[in-house]
Amino acid sequence: MISDNTIIKMIFGFKVKYLRQQKSLSYEQLAEITGLSKSYLHDIEKGRKYPKVDKINALASAFEVGYNFLVSTQASKKLQPLIDLLSSDFVKEFPLEEFGIQPDKLFELFSNTPDKVNAFINTIFKLTRNYQLQREHLYMTALRSFQDMHDNYFESLERAVQYFKEEYQINYPLPLKTTHLEELLQKVFGISVDRTAMAKQGNLKGQRSYFSKKKQTLFINQGLKFAQENFLLGRELAFQYLKLSERPYFTRILGIDSFEKLLNNFKASYFSIALLMPEQQLIQDLNTFLQEPNWNPTSLLHFLEQYDVTPEMFLQRLTNILSKHFGINDLFFIRLVANKDLSYYRMTKELHLSQVHKPHANETNEHYCRRWVSVNIIKRARGLQQLQNDFSPIADAQISKYFGTNNEYLCLSISNPGRLQAEETVSLTIGLMINDQVRRQIRFLNDPKLPSRTVNTTCEQCSILDCEARAATPKVLEQQNQIQRVQEGAAALEK
């Protein structure tokens, strides 16, 4: 994070540099006029020094501007967008170092080409205003970019889990038990767990947990599975052990007001899942699974029992391990949610590594392709709700060939039927782009019984006319075709 003091120095330095260049003054000339040394002027423009009042007055006189103009955050129309950006909470809160960006280098880039940078910044401001992009959307996008930059594998967090286990001699057999995690939280960090108080507060029905710093208590809501409780306990252990002070206190963040809070929440969640699914053990188990000659959904579901984790925790963990240890980093992860009557599907989480893959969220209310395994497994889950009382997770797989491209994905999907009265049903899917590396690593990819289907992104953009699962007309495609016909007509006039 950049401090307010650093921001003030940067803005002042930017103004001095801009005004000096506007006056066509060299460092030597400005030094002679103001009585300040060249090195001191250089440090001011770099945002390293902030002069005292008499020196500011000397600079204001040299530039023929007022004292208040130099020290304020107000500037001319050309300068204002950059100053607004430097003054914004986004720059102050955004941990540039995590992205390998040094603040002084970024400032140097801004100040060297102010006109071009200002035009770009002004464009971004207008886009965010016109499309009503909120700060939390920008932070979420930045977090996904951060994960992609590291192939969603963070060695420092994996090491932290190892150090934690060694320091506190955690050698329990898998899966880790709730009692063991709760005991660690109490003995090591003095944090107690309360499973009754939260349920009495009707306003907290939608939250799974709340940490009270004042009472040093982790409140956990009722009705959760052991796997969900284990994640919450592991997450709290991570916040304490990693000393992540800027953090959310609820499971669901109530407004993302800083990137650091979002990033620390991600780190704690990563730590928790890595604690429940140890890296080396999972590598061995995945090797066995991927070398099976035939696709077997039971083998995939066995991981959930072996580690006592939820489908989302497991598939998210795969994005860490497959990219680092199996060389499979062209992949996506999506969470799809359907309403009760299956008339509407929405994507509530997505992660893309290496590139933006075809199944991605859309904000235009278009209908996702009903040929996706993510959709069909939800339909199966809903059917099981009606037929039986066994609400165990189900798994499915499919080779998805994207229409009009050469891209193929092995998609592994899991859904939990859940309660009959549930308003929504969820599926979690990881898709691996099929290339030579995937073919080498996954033996059951050659299983002739593994279903294969041609799919697309949304019905509105799909030209598969005889699709048996179409939920909407291809109106976007029809609009594109109309534009093409008009262009062809114009071309005919040119002949």
Image (cartoon, grey):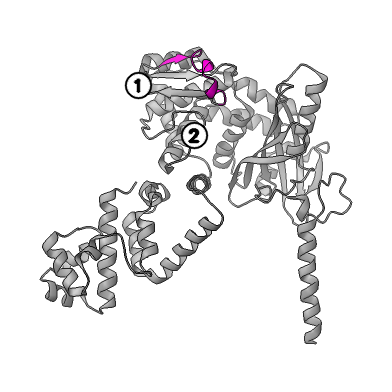
Question: Within 10 angstroms of label 1, few (less than 14), some, or many (20 or more) residues?
Answer: few
Q: Secondary structure at mark 1?
A: loop
Q: CA distance from mark 2 to mark 1?
A: 19 Å
| In-front residue for pair 72/346 | 72
Q: Name the residue that disc number 2 marks.
A: 253
Q: Can residue 293 be spotted in the picture?
A: no
Q: Please, what is the three-letter code of the amino acid marked with disc 2?
A: Ile
The x and y percentages for residue 344 are 74, 40
**Quarter of the figure with residue 393:** top right
**Counting residues from the N terminus, which is met first, the one under dot 2 or under dot 1?**
1
In reply to whether residue 193 is colored magenta, the answer given is yes
Furthest residue toward bottom: 495
Q: Name the residue that disc number 1 marks.
A: 214
The x and y percentages for residue 5 are 25, 51
The x and y percentages for residue 351 are 59, 43
Q: Is residue 440 above or below residue 46?
A: above
Taking the image as shown, residue 345 lies to the left or right of residue 327, namely: right
In reply to whether residue 459 is colored magenta, the answer given is no
Taking the image as shown, residue 17 lies to the left or right of residue 195, namely: left
Q: Please, what is the three-letter code of the amino acid marked with disc 1?
A: Lys
- For the point 84% across and 44% down, the residue is 469
Q: In this picture, which residue range is highlighted in magenta? A: 192-206
Q: Quadrant of the C terminus?
A: bottom right
